[in-house]
Image (spheres, rainbow, N blue to C red):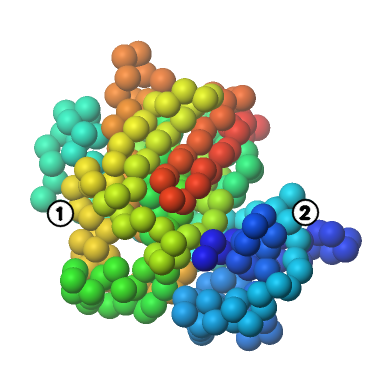
Amino acid sequence: MKLVSFLDQRKGGARRSYGALIDNRIVDLATAAAPTLRDALTIDGVAGIAARLQGLQGAGGPTLREVTLLTPIPDPDKIMCVGLNYHAHAAEANLAVPSKPSVFVRFASSLASQGEPVLRPIVSEQFDYEAELAVVIGRRARRIAEADALQYVAGYACLAENSVRDWQRHSAQATAGKNFVKSGAFGPWLVTPDEAPSPEQMSIIGRLNGEIVQNGSCADLIFGVAQIIAYVTTFTELLPGDVIATGTPAGVGMSRKPPRFLRNGDVFEVEISGLGTLRNPVRDDL
């Protein structure tokens, strides 16, 4: 399934909902008990959502053009991010391959949705692009073995985990450079594991103004998806709808000579094989 969260303003209101995308039309899956996709994952799980969709086959619904897409999970309890997680990216940054995942957090307010402008902070000239694979958790997970970890995945999506580099380096913690409002993006939809390639088979491309600037493979991950989930669940409990950003491949702007950072009017795209393309214009946050 391709699952989307969306804003429907067709009848003069502003109704938020979620559904499955089938042939460019959204089958609305919201219920009184599960009004959001996060609620549905918590109550029904992916299998329950699929069963509900099966019972609604043929039902009408809005097209993508008739709604505004939100981030796939607009209200995650946690967004966990892994830094320096591709071998080629570590090499371009002249940094040693880490022995443990470097984990930091983002807030939901730091992520824009498909087509929505990402905001370049006016306090910095070092707004960098980062194409990443996002993993969405589908079941409550605590102290999970690596061998079992992929069973806890609800699906995968594209993520622009952009960085404000100078603020990222204000201290040993990346938090300040990762949480400017709408500095990153997440979407356009969530693809469930049954319809997605296995992570190690996914290619990941970052495209700036139509030019490929990042071209990697998730097979180059230092810590794979299962390893990350197992590691994170040793120190915190992951909940349905939680998001994990898995790191960016080589080609980021800070490593170029001269450096190449995002500017007002740019367009950055994240394309991942089997998942689609996340596309966002860049605007100054005035």
- The residue identified by callout 1 is 100
Q: Is residue 11 shown above or below 267?
A: below
Q: Amino acid at mark 2?
A: Glu
Q: 41 or 142, which lies in front?
A: 41
Q: Residue at x 41, y 66 (%)?
A: 194
Q: 154 or 178, which lies in front?
A: 154
Q: Quadrant of the C terminus?
A: top right
x and y percentages locating residue 44 in the rendered image: 51, 83
Q: Amino acid at mark 1?
A: Lys
User: Which one is in front in this view, the residue at disc 1 or the one at disc 2?
Assistant: 2
Q: Is residue 168 visible?
A: yes
x and y percentages locating residue 175 in the rendered image: 37, 48
Q: Which mark is residue 44?
A: none
Q: 224 or 63, which lies in front?
A: 63
Q: Residues within 10 Å of mark 2 (few under 14, many from 20)?
A: some
Q: Residue at x 39, y 26 (%)?
A: 213
Q: Spot the residue most to the front.
A: 58
In screen coordinates, is 179 left or right of 257? right
Which secondary structure lies at badge 1?
Answer: loop
- Real-space Cα distance between discs 1 and 2? 45 Å
Q: Residues within 10 Å of mark 1 (few under 14, many from 20)?
A: few
In screen coordinates, is 25 left or right of 193? right
Q: Is residue 209 shown above or below 190?
A: above
Q: Residue at x 46, y 51 (%)?
A: 275
Q: Is residue 177 visible?
A: no
- The residue identified by callout 2 is 66
In screen coordinates, is 143 left or right of 256? left
Q: Is residue 194 shown above or below 211?
A: below
Query: Which of the two labelled residues, at mark 1 and mark 2, occupies the earlier sequence position?
Result: 2
